[in-house]
Amino acid sequence: MDVHASLRHLRMSPRKVRLVVNAIRGQKATVAETRLQFMQQRAAQPVLKLLRSAMANAVNNFQLSKESLTIAKITADGGPSLKRFSPRAFGRAAPIRQRTAHIMITLTSPEAGRAKAVAETTEKTTKKSAAQAKKPAAARAKKAKAPSVKKEAAS
């Protein structure tokens, strides 16, 4: 089961946010939370808040345990830039782009993945048995005899 959370329009450069995001990618959620608490970068605080939000979503909405969660995917993409101007010499103006970032995080739980896999396999077997039940008995008997005839012909 995947749990998503996103933070949009963070007033910080995506390049600076990626430094923090890359440090926690693929880790257990509890380990990543501890790492973010002790990071010196300013971007660590909003990423920590987002991680805690995703963990709360998993616990409250899907009844998953915090300890089983891992960071499956985390991205820091660019958002819209605020365009400003700075005065320069001889009456000129130099552009300033104040960048924003969008952060998306996806947490996954192996225990939920196992439950999903079991549900899919049971669904496939019930479809097979339902399809076989629809076929007439004569067609099923022909299929059963066909492999044995080929074996006799081969020997």
Image (cartoon, rainbow, N blue to C red):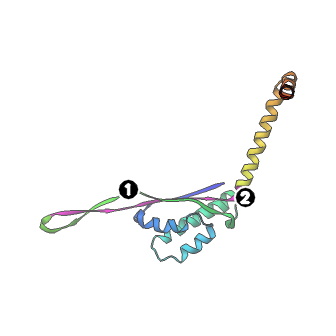
Up-down relation of residue 114 to residue 51 (above or below): above
x%, y% of residue 121? 76, 44
Disc 2 is placed on an element classified as helix
Q: Is residue 135 left or right of residue 31?
A: right
Please identify the dominant SS of the magenta region.
strand
Residue at 63% across / 70% down in the picture? 30
Q: In this view, does 94 lie to the left or right of 27?
A: left
Which callout, 2 or 1, points to the residue nearer the camera?
Answer: 2
Up-down relation of residue 60 to residue 139 (above or below): below
Q: Gap between marks 2 and 1, in whole Å?
A: 38 Å
Residue at 67% across / 62% down in the picture? 59
Residue type at numbered disc 1: Pro
The answer to whether the residues at label 2 and label 1 have Cβ atoms under 8 Å apart is no
Q: Give the range drawn in magenta.
A: 92-112
- Extreme residue in the front direction: 155
x%, y% of residue 147? 83, 29
Q: Mark 2 points at which residue?
A: 111
Disc 1 is placed on an element classified as loop
Numbered circle sitting on residue 130? none
Q: Residues within 10 Å of mark 1 (few under 14, many from 20)?
A: some
Residue at 55% across / 75% down in the picture? 37
Up-down relation of residue 125 to residue 52 (above or below): above
Figure quadrant of residue 93: bottom left
Up-down relation of residue 118 to residue 6 (above or below): above
Q: Mark 1 points at which residue?
A: 80
**Quadrant (top left, top right, bottom left, bottom right) of the C terminus:** top right
**Is residue 105 rendered magenta in the image?**
yes
